[in-house]
Image: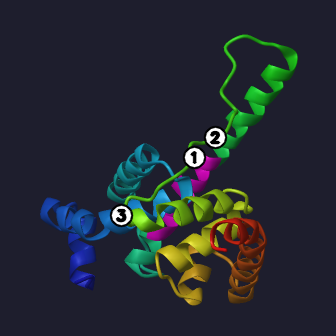
Amino acid sequence: MITKDFINRLKKGDPGSFRLLVSTFSGRVYNTALGLVQRQEDAEDITQEVFIEVFQTIPGFREESKLSTWIYRITVSKSLELLRKQNRAKRKGTIQSLFGIENQINVSGKEPFFHPGINLEKKEMAAALFTALQKLPLSQRTAYTLHKLDGLKYSELAEVMGISLSAVESHIFRANRKLKELLRVYYENNLM
């Protein structure tokens, strides 16, 4: 489907090609964003932002990587940008609450996240996993999410994240180790 001719039509602004691109990739973009930001509204906003950026910047796409890799890279970038912005707001809210400043930002934490693709019986376990994912450093969370939830191979992860293959392996290894540690208590209490 993604041919040189298709990319050329996108670069020329062909609306039909862009609609096909959106229909092909919107589900993947949304799921990737949702796995990272864990809020449906934010994932929807990111999905729109990604395709706006793709539309605006496709003429400059140099085709040094696959189109799908480029779109994943934009998605991850937009998702991490939002997470960093939220973290700054939380820190600001914490500082405000320490000094008693009015109009404080709620820093009490997120509601449990339930991915819409998880069936009812597994929602509690999935919520525990997504809560644990929030405690990982962003690089580990990104690598883990793209690998486990989106099914990207290590080589694709390296390209999307702009890091070496050994760095990807390290991120996944550390994420798995930390998640096992974080989820051990949950599984001991709920599966025994």
**Residue 79 magenta:** yes
Mark with earlier residue (3, 2) = 3
Q: Which residue is mark 3?
A: 58
Of the 4 image quadrants, the one containing the C terminus is bottom right
Which residue is denoted by mark 1 in the rendering? 82
Tally of numbered tags = 3
Reading the chain from its start, which is encountered first: label 3 or label 1?
3
Mark 2 highlights which residue?
86
Depicted 32 relative to depicted 154: above or below: above
Q: Magenta segment, principal secondary structure?
A: helix
Q: Position of residue 120 (x, y in %)?
A: 39, 62
Q: Residues within 10 Å of mark 1 (few under 14, many from 20)?
A: some
Horizontal placement of 16 versus 99: left or right? left
Quarter of the rendering occupied by the N terminus = bottom left
Q: Are marks 2 and 1 in contact (CB under 8 Å)?
A: yes
Comparing labels 3 and 1, the label whose residue is closer to the camera: 1
> Which residues, given as a range, are shown in magenta?
72-83
At numbered mark 1, what does the secondary structure look like: helix, strand or loop?
helix
Which residue is drawn at the image coordinates 25% and 68% (left, top)?
Answer: 21
Instruction: Determine the image quadrant of residue 128.
Output: bottom right
- Which residue extends farthest top? 102
Q: Secondary structure at mark 3?
A: helix
Which image quadrant for residue 129? Answer: bottom right
Q: Position of residue 149 (x, y in %)?
A: 49, 74
For the point 76% across and 82% down, the residue is 170
Where does residue 103 sit, x and y in percent of width and height? 67, 14
